[in-house]
């Protein structure tokens, strides 16, 4: 095999690769001997079929596999001998391949850019932090109590009003036909909750215990049950009771309903949970600021092939579809043709460049500082993924065991987080305490660029 460089620039190297007919012939024989170990032919023991007979029967069939193998070997040899750092798989063009003429192909490598990492200790970041306030904890308890309301029958007979709970029997029909799910007894309906369709609840507001009401409604166009979409329905409703919510007292008895010994224990649990949520928001904000700083402090051109692939990926996610073509080849052309406006195109291409650039910076920071993912961390990630599918944990474990690329995809965010944490640990970080509203607003303002 002969490898000759035909073109060289800072970001791109091109090579021609040739193999003689004799070299190709040897690779074909090697492949035929490999398959001959298992092939059974009349008159020969397994593994004893002569190569010339195998060639006559299987020679043309193995040519594709031989070509793939020699191309892969030539890529590896080219990379190793020239100490290349390819950004992606090279573009390969096979110009000739046969037993008579050997192999002739060209390879175009787009290289990773060379750049110096900024001194991370020179990076200055402001970290927004927020702490749960007593009013926040009380509001959370109110929300908890709202989903576990206790009610009582109203003491003084009166008409129902918004906020009351009416206990009703109802039986509905569409064009006189009874439909499944349109009948119930002793149903507790909170007036004003908008839990029933159309203005169902409004027609029960102002009723008294013992009233019979004919309620007429129209189901929405997007109703979950396809057979009831846009349907006009009639419900015969009997109002059996009118109840009102009992004011909740936040005491030990209230806490025990949720498995806590005292109201203090419940408040501590809520505070701990809120603290964790606020810390996640805080980290999202400082990560965005770090990436902004790294973007500003590193000046190099991202490999065009990687940018095209990322741009294509962004566009396909927006369009909600997959594409069978190799993104390196058609990413830019297809996506730009598909794009709604030139402005959109430029916007998402800018995002793609930023993502590729920052990905390279983080990868280089991880490489230089020997940051690695431990087996324990990877196992924890698989376990966390399995917990998302109760009852199917074994299948999830088996999937990741047998699907290397899925496992690699699981590694990527873990690795990125480790590198980000490492850099933040080296940077100069000043904390600023803000309200949770300010922290939430800061995180909401984070765009797609990260």
Image: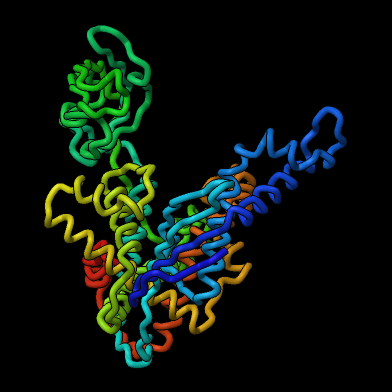
Looking at the image, which residue sits at the far front?
100
The residue shown at (43%, 71%) is 5
Tell me which corner region of the image, top left, top right, bottom left or bottom right, holds residue 281: bottom left
Tell me which corner region of the image, top left, top right, bottom left or bottom right, holds residue 352: bottom left
Q: Which of 130 and 399 lies nearest the eye of the viewer? A: 399
Residue 125 in the image: above or below residue 91: below
On the picture, is 365 further left or further right than 9? Answer: right
Q: Which of 403 and 420 lies nearest the eye of the viewer? A: 403
Q: Position of residue 192 (x, y in %)?
A: 21, 38
Q: Which of 187 and 332 lies nearest the eye of the viewer? A: 332
Residue 48 visible: yes
The residue shown at (27%, 81%) is 299
Q: Which of 436 and 411 lies nearest the eye of the viewer? A: 411
Residue 357 in the image: above or below residue 124: above
Quadrant that contains the C terminus: bottom left
Residue 233 in the image: above or below residue 441: above
Residue 271 visible: no
Q: Position of residue 98 (x, y in %)?
A: 54, 46
The residue shown at (54%, 66%) is 2
Q: Position of residue 184 (x, y in %)?
A: 37, 22
Quadrant that contains the N terminus: bottom right
On the picture, is 448 further left or further right than 216? Answer: right
Tell me which corner region of the image, top left, top right, bottom left or bottom right, holds residue 197: top left
On the picture, is 308 further left or further right than 276? Answer: left
Residue 318 in the image: above or below residue 282: above
The residue shown at (65%, 52%) is 27
């Amino acid at each position: 095999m002969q490898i000759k460089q035909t073109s060289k620039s800072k970001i791109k190297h091109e090579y021609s690769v040739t193999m003689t007919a004799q070299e190709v012939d040897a690779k074909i024989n090697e492949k035929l001997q490999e398959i001959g170990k298992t092939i059974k032919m009349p008159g020969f023991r397994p593994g004893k079929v002569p190569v010339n007979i195998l060639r006559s029967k299987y020679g043309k069939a193995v040519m594709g596999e031989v070509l793939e193998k020699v191309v892969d070997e030539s890529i590896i040899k080219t990379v190793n001998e020239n100490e290349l750092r390819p950004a992606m798989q090279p573009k390969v063009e096979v110009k000739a391949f046969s037993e008579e003429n050997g192999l002739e192909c060209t390879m175009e490598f787009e290289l990773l850019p060379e750049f110096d990492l900024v001194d991370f200790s020179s990076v200055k970041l402001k970290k927004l932090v927020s702490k749960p306030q007593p009013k926040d904890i009380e509001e959370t308890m109110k929300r908890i109590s709202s989903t576990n309301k206790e009610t009582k029958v109203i003491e003084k007979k009166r008409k129902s009003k918004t906020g009351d709970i009416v206990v009703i029997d109802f039986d509905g029909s569409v064009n006189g036909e009874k439909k499944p799910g349109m009948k119930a007894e002793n149903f507790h309906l909170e007036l004003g909750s908008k839990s029933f369709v159309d203005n169902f609840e409004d027609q029960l507001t102002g009723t008294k215990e013992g009233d019979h009401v004919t309620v007429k409604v129209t189901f929405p166009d997007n109703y979950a049950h396809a057979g009831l979409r846009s349907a006009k329905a009639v419900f015969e409703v009997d109002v059996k009771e009118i109840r009102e919510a009992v004011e909740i007292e936040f005491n030990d008895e209230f806490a025990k309903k949720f498995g806590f010994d005292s109201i203090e224990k419940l408040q501590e649990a809520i505070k701990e949970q809120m603290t964790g949520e606020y810390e996640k928001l805080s980290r999202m904000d400082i990560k965005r600021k770090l990436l902004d700083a790294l973007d500003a402090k590193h000046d190099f051109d991202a490999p065009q092939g990687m940018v095209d692939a990322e741009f294509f990926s962004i566009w396909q996610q927006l369009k909600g579809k997959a594409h069978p073509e190799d993104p390196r080849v058609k990413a830019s052309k297809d996506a730009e043709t598909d794009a709604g406006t030139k402005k959109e195109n430029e916007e998402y291409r800018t995002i793609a460049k930023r993502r590729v650039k920052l990905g390279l910076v983080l990868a280089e920071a991880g490489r230089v500082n020997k940051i690695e993912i431990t087996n324990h961390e990877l196992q924890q990630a698989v376990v966390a993924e399995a917990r998302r599918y109760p009852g199917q944990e074994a299948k999830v474990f088996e999937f990741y065991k047998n699907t290397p690329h899925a496992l690699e995809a699981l590694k990527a965010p873990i690795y990125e987080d480790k590198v980000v944490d490492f850099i933040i640990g080296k940077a100069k970080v000043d904390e600023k305490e803000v309200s949770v509203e300010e922290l939430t607003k800061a995180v909401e303002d984070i765009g797609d660029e990260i």
